[in-house]
Image (cartoon, coloured by chain):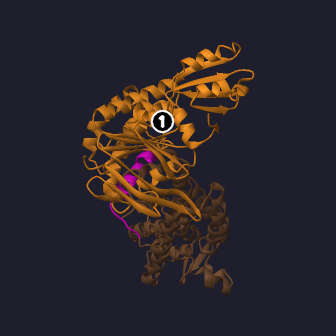
Chain colours: A brown, B orange
Amino acid sequence: MSQIQNNIWAAPRLSMRWWPVFQRNWLVWKKLAIPSLVGNIAEPLMWLVAFGYGMGALIGQVEMGGEKVPYILFLASGSICMSAMNAATFEALYSAFSRMHVQKTWDGIMNAPVRLDDVVLAEMLWAAFKALFSVTAILLVMLVLDISHSWKLLVAWPVLLGVGITFSCMALIFNALAKGYDFFTYYFTLFLTPMMFLSGIFFPREQLPAFVRVIADWLPLSVAVDLVRPMFLDRWPDEPVRLVLVLAGFAGVSFWIALALTRKRFRS
Amino acid sequence: MNNPLLSVEHLVKRYGEATVVNDLSFHIQPGECLGVIGPNGAGKTTTLRMCLGLSEPSGGEIRYFDGLQMPGDALAIKARLGVVAQSDTLDPDFTSEENLLVFGRYFGIPDAVIRERIPQLLEFGALSHKAKAKPGELSGGMKRRLSLSRALINQPQLLMLDEPTTGLDPQARHLMWERLQLLLQEGKSILLTTHFMDEAERLCSRLLVLDQGRKIAEGKPRDLIAEHLEPEVVEVFGQGAVALGQEAGLKALAGRVEVSGETVFFYTQDSRALMHALEAWPAMRTLHRPSNLEDLFLKLTGRQIREEG
């Protein structure tokens, strides 16, 4: 079939040709890993220290499912989802846009036998990988700080990769629509920032007015927090199947939309 | 006749009401260099994009090699093509070597094989001393040669080059031409689009002239000139030159007279009588030369005010 599907809503046609594209991003990143690492974990840790220890001292403990837990544990278990979201989003917006639009890397790749669908898949997985990388570094620091040491964190780790995948798929929709970097401000201001405050990262969603909660409970970041937080408390999430399916639904639908809009962008 | 490497039949591309490629047919035989020339907006790049499977034709057929069809068999065709796009798509974060390595991987070529090919490709691009340099440290000509070397990583039979020397200085252009001629000598085939008539004349065994999406002429450069033009041109310029274009005595000696700006072009079968007659205007400056592709191009695509002599 054609490299760029003419019917933009046609089913994704994926093959292993995404791998050399992923490898390409990996090779670039290896050269810049240290500054990237600092940027990816320094900021989340500052949030954690400032809010967790600072505010935590004022707040004391938060009640979670009948159990009282230190505020820093509450915050850490939520903010790690936010870190996964942010890392994936930045990569799938700014960096992917640079490669797609500014450097024309994608055009170069499509002069080789690689389909656009595989390029988009590679970018999606790459952004998710970046999220996993950040999350891993932060998790290690949290272990060192002894915030949590549940063995269930080993299960939380792949779940956080899934969170990265979901937000990477969502960001690629906006990547496909962007005419310039400024466009991404809308996504952050209108979507990510409100979600950050509504998803129960900084305070329990029980504090929200009932009509806001109806929406807030179904936000992808809320779902991610509901999945990951219990594992920090050495418990299993309630309704894990529903939560995983919701997250997978967000990812799948977003990927399809992102792919369709990217095909539309490249089709001429 | 061999089987053509590329054969395009009745290709059409429409954008809404506008038809930018209109019933275009052509082919490329093994070992041939086909030049596609035409003014801006003639449909050159659109045609190339359709041939590369990046744009869906509104009609017609594009066949490669032994019956592979674009866009249906795009990946199988791409595996055997070398492409140099109009603007460089080199990776700015990679050295020359890494650019070749990463690009080779897109073809599924094993790393060991790519690494074996890299030194030869860098040498071919006269870039051996720049193996560790990033594109930002390369001159315009070097970047184009790296793009060409990169396009050769899969040892393609057919190269598709979109304006390969646009923006290069004369030295860099000549080096590029030399490399392309080497490839032709090795038996590779090339399709290239260009704005430069000297490039077309030098490299191309056959030319396709496009205007407004249609093929308006096709043939060997020399044949096209012989077919459409008188063999000699006398250009006259200077104060009052334009008025000479109306001079009945001179017009009678020329096959055709064209005026462009302040210059008069007398196209003629034999310039001796004309040159002699022009001695009556000693203040005029004249340039006597054989007619060339540029004259042909301007005649066919009509950017000049034409006056039949």
Residue type of the residue flagged with mark 1: Pro
Residue farthest to the right, as pictured: B239
Task: Indicate yes or no whether the magenta region holds residue B52.
Answer: no
Q: Residue at x 54, y 74 (%)?
A: A220
Residue B133 visible? The answer is no
User: Is label 1 in a helix, a strand or a loop?
Assistant: helix
Span of residues in magenta: A12-30
Q: Residue at x 44, y 78 (%)?
A: A244
Q: Residue at x 43, y 72 (%)?
A: A10
* Quadrant including the N terminus of chain A: bottom left
Task: Indicate yes or no whether the magenta region holds residue A17.
Answer: yes
B139 in relation to A92, above or below: above
Q: Is residue A74 left or right of residue B10?
A: right
User: Which is nearer the eye, A56 or A39?
Assistant: A39
User: Which is nearer the eye, A46 or A30?
Assistant: A30
Q: Residue at x 30, y 39 (%)?
A: B31
Q: Is residue A183 left or right of residue B300?
A: right
